[in-house]
Amino acid sequence: MFRAAIRNVHLVWIILLRLALVPQAGCRSADAGSCHEVKIAYMMRQIGPVELVPERPGTGEPLRVCLHTGPSCCTSKMEDSYMAAVRSEMQHKLRSYSFELKYLIDGHRKAYQETFESLVSFTSNLTCTLFDSAYSALASDCRPAVFKLFSEISCHLSGEANSSLNNAVRQFYNDLFPLVYRRLLNPGIGHMSAISHSSFSTNRDDCLRMTQQDVNPFGPHPRLLMNSLSLALRPGRALSRLLRLAGEVVNSTEKVTLSRECGRGLVKMQYCSHCRGLTLIRPCTGLCINVMRGCLVGVSELGASWGSLVVLLQRVAATLATSSNHNSMELALLAVRNHVNDAILHAQLHGPRITATVEKVCGPQEPGPVVMDERSSQLHAATRATLLASNKSAATQHPSPHHRLQPQPQRSFPLKGSRGDKSRSLKKLSREFEISIQRYQWFLSELPEMLCESEMEVEQHTCWSGEDVVESYAGRVVGSTLKGQKENPEISTRHTDPALKEVKQRMEQITQELLVDLGWASKKRGRGEEEDGGSTQTDGGSGDDCDDEDGCEASGEESGDDSSSGRSPEVKDVAPPPPRRPVSPVQHSPPQVAIHGSAHKSTFELLTVVIPLLLTLSSWEPR
């Protein structure tokens, strides 16, 4: 027992003596006389040709960054290789940290686009069935116009800058009027034969399109459709634009230009310790934060604007996730069918006036050879019979007197795919995105610190200060703003990347533009705005010349259904997020939007006025 104890004591002393004489791995100085570990690290990180690393430390090498009075394992060519390596490593780190955010944005952008396209395709086919069932004489020729209208709606929802709902609706009704005039209002004209169609019908159709603004054959229904779509599709269009903008911002941060001063600071932080043979020591936390904030000062300057963008994304997603607002987009697209039907019925009720006005401007219809459409003639006869019988229906306060041509109004119902359809609903998709994007509100502001956290994964009692091994960093840790970088002891930063400045301005401009467009920005009341806040019309946006983003649907000129369709959301303030303090998603409910699927009430009131006139003119037949 005693001999065994003596043997153990001797073993302990031998181990302690060896630990005292042999320095720790990675902390051996280059003064020990070998650069073997430096060569291994140089080769493992694939910094450059391993032949550049000397076998033994030397002196007298003209170093520019890793200055040291004693022997060094670095050469000037190695410093150049280190400079290129830190730039590549920095870009790789930025891409790695932004990968999840980029995937979230791109994935949801595609998911929203697919959801919008599915909804638009469904309602486009639904609108085509109106002509197939009620206006078969127009079905084949109206189908391209319907598809063109919904194609423009899809472009508008995707955030296309040049898309205009108002222009698309106007063009649709411009193409519809010649067909309605020749096939429904004057079915006796029939279809022009192939010989005369190209020479006469084209010119007359052009004349009909030019006179439509004066004739106003479809009454208020084109404008009602503009207002309904413009108001209901705003959140979807805003979300598409914001997602595209967010993707551009993330891409710009990945491609940030690193200055020469930044490269020198990174080399000093990561590789100057290698010149002393210290390949495993970590940089001090304060040194890392100063270097990263100096390198990414342009990215940090985007932090506040990015936070506001994320808050707006959350709010728009919450608007789409709310049942009433979700249904408003859905019902507005479903109601296109009813708006078009009401417009055609309005033209039929005013057929004699429209025909008389057109013949004064475009001249009477020349007889010429025609091919009669028997079904169109039957439909016209049915229409006249319905209108003549509507006097008794109006007297007894029956519902719409033209129910034979008008399909039943669409009820509010969710558009659901088949069981095999794995696509997510708009409501579920928006709720998921609202929660996911919240985590990245402070991503750009805290990116320098996140990059340093990866450098500090292993705790050590000593660290690299950029010049020597110390127990703690003695320099001052500066703020992340451009003003704070003036006192940065590691990197001298005078200006930020011009490309990032442009991104910041674009982000602020689009965010503010969408806040105004959605009615969520605080605006001082002007002389043209009503006291009840019912109008948010912008300068120059009035009448038929206003664009879909000018707020013309909120002019409040119409009464009844029209005024309801043109009501603007309640104006709310959206303040930029406070610096570096997480904020929960917006808790108050988004603005409620009133959408009416059609204008049956206006049509019914119009019938009571026009029916007596039609009875008087019942013996009149079109030419």
Image (cartoon, helix red, strand yellow):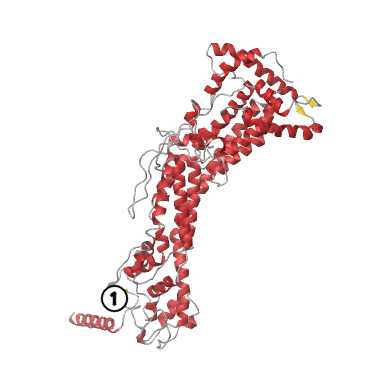
Q: Quadrant of residue 366?
A: top right
Residue 424 appearing in the image: no
Q: Position of residue 27 (x, y in %)?
A: 33, 79
Q: Quadrant of the N terminus?
A: bottom left
- Residue 12: which quarter of the image? bottom left
Nearest the eye: 394 or 613? 613
User: Which of the two residues, 65 or 172, is positioned nearer the viewer here?
Assistant: 172
The kind of residue on which mark 1 rests is Val
Residue 232 image offset from top left, x and y in percent: 49, 36
Q: What secondary structure is found at the residue carrying circle 1?
A: strand
**Residue sitting farthest toward the front:** 527
Q: Quadrant of the C terminus?
A: top right
Reply above or below: 497 against 428. Answer: below
**Which residue, given by chain and number where applicable, does mark 1 sit on?**
470
Residue sitting at 38 percent across and 40 percent down? 572
Percent coordinates x, y for residue 529 in the rendering: 43, 36
Residue 267 visible in rendering: yes
